[in-house]
Image: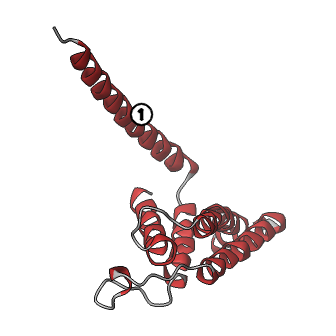
Amino acid sequence: LGVILSFNLTNTSLIMLRCGNGGKMVSSKVVRRWAMSLWVFGALGSYSAWHGYCKPMLDGNSDGVMTSLTSVGVASILVATLSIWKIDVNRQEFDDITTRKDIFMTPLMPYTPGFAILLNFFLMAQFTLIDHYIFGMFIAVFVLGYFGYKTGKHMQKRARASFRF
């Protein structure tokens, strides 16, 4: 799950670099919102379509197909596809070094990384719920540990700065 999630983060970074901010500190709010929409509806659609249609059909249980869940999945995937298109329509154009041909490029930007995000969510949907819980706890422990470490370092700096004669 971690590797697939990191691929999605990398693809989103590529979309934001090429369409949203061009490597500058300020990003396009419109592109950022559509990228978030791609994540939300892409995940919802992929998980719903996988568990509502793909998994029962691949298991040979056509009676187990859940029409309502499949409908939600298909509708969400269509919204995610619309999000990819809206990112393309609202892309920012840059005249600096980030648009040069010798810098890494991806064909059909933002469609290739956008559909890769959807495919990765389909791959993530194949893992069990327990795998997702364990991965979520793993991430939570390390994020909390990071913030605890960062807060402790900040408190040490403040304590040293106030201990002057």
Query: Where residue 114 sits in the image (x, y, percent)?
Result: 54, 76
11 shown above or below 158: below
Coloring applied to the structure:
secondary structure
**Amino acid type of the residue that numbered disc 1 sits on in the rendered structure:** Leu
| Image quadrant where residue 62 sits | bottom right
Q: Mark 1 points at which residue?
A: 144
Residue at horizontal 51 percent and vertical 72 percent from the top:
20
Q: Residue 43: x and y, percent?
A: 62, 63
Extreme residue in the top direction: 165
Dot 1: within a 10 Å radius of its alpha carbon, few (fewer than 14), some, or many (20 or more) residues?
few
- Which of 157 and 128 lies nearest the eye of the viewer? 157
Residue at the location (25% across, 24% down)?
Answer: 157
Horizontal side of residue 53 vs 137, given as left or right: right
Q: Which residue lies furthest to the front in this view?
A: 165
- Between 39 and 162, the residue placed more toward the observer is 162
* Residue 151 position by quadrant: top left
Q: Is residue 10 left or right of residue 81?
A: left
Q: Number of numbered discs present?
A: 1
Farthest-out residue, right: 68
